[in-house]
Amino acid sequence: MASAAARSFVFRQHINTCRLDFASCLNIKSFYSSYSANPKEKSPEHYTQYHEVSSDNWKFVERLKPPTVVPSFPKNGSYFSDWTPPPDTPPNLPYFVKRTKNFMVPVYLNFEAIRNQRKITMVKHIEGDIWAMEKDIKSHLEEVTKRPVVSQVHEVGMYIKFRGDYALHVKKWLLNAGF
Amino acid sequence: MATKIINKTVTEFSLRITRCFFVPSKAIQTNAALFQERSETSITNVAEQLLPTIRPPLPIIYSRKLAFPPKFKAVRQAWVSNMDTVEEEKLGLIDLHPEVFAERPRVDIIHENVRWQQLYRHVSYANTKVKYEVRGGGRKPRPQKGSGRSRHGSIRSPIWRGGGIVHGPRSPTPYFYMLSFNARLNGLRSTLSAKLAQDDLHIVDSLDIPTDDPSYLEKLVEERGWGPAVLFVDDNDIMPLNITAASDVHGHYNLMPVYGLNVHSMLKHHTLVLTLAAVERIEERLLFHLNRNDAAEAGRKYKLDSL
């Protein structure tokens, strides 16, 4: 008994010595450590009412949470943007370009600059004969833009870079090719 | 999920499975009748005086569901072996996801991972004294003018012999840095793929061995040609008693839970032996990180302000 009182005294002391900046303006609820110091429970009408709902309502909470894994795209066929879904069969070519996990075509426009803003178009996730792919895309770009195109083939990282902003052209080419 | 082998004892007669030796050139016959019983009487024929392993007809494990089934990449397959006997018995064939086990091995990423693992915990304790730390050198050696010699402020300046070192090592110097999340993820993928491609990856049903004799493990590894150093990986971090006792003696047979799997250990040990549960867990985790909706969260745990 005495030890419990001593402990509660020590505990209350500890609370009082904790200084909080907003303590002076707000009324912070104290946490009493002994039963006798606590305010006693009142009859139910003094407290807010509550009622239990069905656990089926959890689905309203669940649908607010974002999915942990990228969900699959709807297969109804009508898409309002330029996006087309990845095909079910791969095209008959010696190379393949895999879509990203968000089902987008892996073409990126980078600004790799040391002094001037140099625009680089990058195609990633390439599998197969990367040199054949580079030849095909390069010839297409030179046909479209009527000027020479500089490219880099990175065989280890399996990506191709083109110097210039050809992102839209490359994307269109890939979609037409069937990737 | 991982299927466990249930050793059934039949009361009327004992099933004795004939040893199945690995024959790469011939087609493996998976006819169940091939592994049916022969009425052998004596148990003492077994070399190690072990009880005969009783098994239901093979193949026991023959299917596995892949998460995020690959669209155009061929699924890889691997045998599932046992650990009950010294000789290898193939319990079945399972599918392995190509995104985890058949990725193009990026040697540069593997190197990055090994370098990081060796370096992030390295602290250099080499130390040299700076001029104010070297004993002495507080007094001006000679007056500024008059002696005809060069002017100096202290005998411990860096241009003096025995003086302080300017840009020398300063103890303790940490070499801590965090490799990016995707570099570590792709390091695991590349190493697992390389191990499978080089026949250094084996899958077993579980790590339960019949005896805690260290020589059992030696003979097993020797018989199967698993290489000098073997890394056994299981999903659980509390391993069965027998294999723990048997491998404790040998420094080159190591047990590891899946969460400890790393590129350096996989390369250091010649052979990697995964249990079915470990394969499931590894695939589930790696494929989740490859397909997760919030990729930025993956690296946030170890993101440091100063790096």
Image (cartoon, coloured by chain):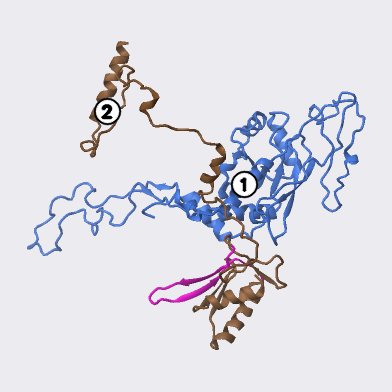
Chain colours: A brown, B blue
Quarter of the view holding residue A179:
bottom right
* Residue B158 x %, y %: 24, 57
User: In this view of the protein, which residue sits in the foreground, B303 or B249?
Assistant: B303
| Residue with the most extreme front position | A45
Asked whether residue B194 appears in the rendered view, the answer is: no
* Chain of the residue that carries numbered disc 1 in the rendered image: B
User: For the view shown, which residue lies furthest in the top direction?
Assistant: A1
Q: What is the chain identity of the residue bearing mark 2?
A: A
Q: Are marks 1 and 2 on the same chain?
A: no
Q: Position of residue B232 (x, y in %)?
A: 64, 40
In the rendered structure, the answer to whether residue B73 lies left or right of residue B185 reads right
Instruction: Check if residue B115 falls in the magenta segment.
Output: no
Counting from the top left corner in percent of width and height, residue A126 is at 62, 68
Residue holding disc 2: A15
Residue A26 or residue B163, whichever sits in front: A26
Q: Which mark is residue B282?
A: 1
Side (left or right) of B164 relative to B268: left
Residue B297 at x, y = what percent?
Answer: 48, 52
Secondary structure at badge 2 equals helix
Residue at 59% from the left image edge and 35% from the top image edge: B237
Image vertical order of residue B5 relative to residue A79, above or below: above
Dividing the image into 4 quarters, which one contains the C terminus of chain B?
bottom left
Tell me which segment is drawn in magenta: A103-128
Q: CA distance from mark 1 to mark 2?
A: 48 Å
Q: Amino acid at mark 1?
A: Ile
Between disc 1 and disc 2, the foreground one is 2
Disc 2 residue type (three-letter): Ile
